[in-house]
Image (spheres, rainbow, N blue to C red):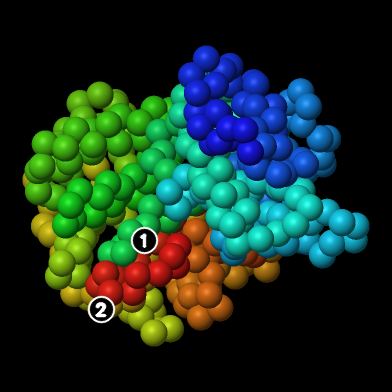
Amino acid sequence: MAADPLRSLLREIHLLAPDQLSAAVASHGRGLGSRETVVYLADYEQLLLQPLRGEGVPVRQELRVDGSLGGRAFRRVEVLTSPARTRAHRLWVPLLDGVERLGVVEFVVDQVTPELQEQLLAYVGLIAELIVVNDAYTDIFAQLRRRKTMSLAAEIQWDLLPPLTFASDRVVVAGALEPAYDIGGDTFDYAVNGPTVDLLVLDAVGHGLPAALLASAAVGAYRHARRDMRDLPDVAAAMNEVIAGQFTDSRFATAAIARLHLDTGQLRWVNAGHPDPLIVRDGVLLHPGPCKPHPPLGLQVRKPDVCEVQLHVGDRVVLYTDGIVEARSPEGEFFGEERLADFVHRGAAEGDSAPETLRRLVRRVLDHQADHLQDDASIVLLEWRTGAERRLDI
């Protein structure tokens, strides 16, 4: 091999336009022994994998996440190989930014060896980093990921979100939003700061752009107070002040503002007119005990009280907006907390990662409501660990 393809791509990328990335990836992939290299990105709803086209890149059609081998590699976060019908083998490698699933990469190679697979895994890791970095400079990847026109409110909300997945040996955090193309007032945020994990799930009153603007101001106030290292009641008070001071007509937002201490498993939270967290432990739905609710943010007159609960190792904590449990079937049946908890437990029992559990859960909620949500729905799933598991169970 004349030159290391990874190093060659790294040298080239500094002056490479984003629309040339797929061509460069395919070209340098040939140096690794891949006849064809195609990058696929997941759409916003994580239903399809869309090929990233470019000069010299083989033409491919979109793949369904459910119902294709590439989709299975995405769902299970596994390297999969298509049965060889000719001399060539087709490898599907998950495209991960840390542990967040961006899509998959398809390689066509003559022979699969452990050494080659290790090289391709490193190559895909580099591709993921380049996509994330270049995404800040271009609309190409965002345009590829959407299957239809996105509302202005949804555009604001998606740009406001943190990565949909974070995982370490101590904690897993995964989130989801629906309807992906028309979300208004629902959003979530989180931050992992040393021994603590901060979480927010928020539902701004109203719909469309007014709700998105209120949610944006609320999240901005939340991050400002959180980064100022304030305790939860002071975080809530800062958010309440911004909403009450900047939005008229008694506009408000409900919220669950939580903080998990990773060393002890102590979960503390503030309830601002919002559903309390749910805990799924060994398949059983637990309510974390009585917690005094307070008015929504924007309507509070004093700092709220803090509630707390002691988690057990492996507990899955669910923070959600009412669009999840109040999703109603055509016959009038609510989706409900029990169905939500059962789905989360079965996902864990079947070996699904937290983000895959949420992806399937959102699809189930949509099916329950005949594919038409009557309200925005957002959900965050957190799993606490001791650090002894040491497994990539994301």
Q: Is residue 389 visible?
A: yes
Image height of 77 relative to 54, above or below: below
Q: Is residue 265 left or right of residue 380?
A: left
Q: What whole-number distance in Å separates the C-alpha atoms at marks 2 and 1?
A: 14 Å
Q: Quadrant location of residue 127?
A: top right
Task: Name the element at disc 2.
Answer: loop
Instruction: Estimate the x, y position of residue 47 in percent, counting from the top left.
Output: 68, 51
Q: Nearer the viewer, residue 88 or 47?
A: 88
What amino acid is labelled 1 in the image? Val
Q: Nearer the viewer, residue 79 or 166?
A: 79
Camera-near label (2 vs 1) is: 1
Disc on the earlier residue, 2 or 1: 1
Q: Is residue 74 visible?
A: no
Check disc 1 and report the residue beneath it.
172
Where does the C terminus fall, quadrant-wise?
bottom left
* Residue positioned 55% across, 28% down in the render: 8
Check disc 2 and report the residue beneath it.
312
* Residue positioned 62% across, 33% down in the render: 2
Q: Quadrant location of residue 185?
A: top left
Q: Nearer the viewer, residue 97 or 143?
A: 97
Where does the N terminus fall, quadrant-wise?
top right
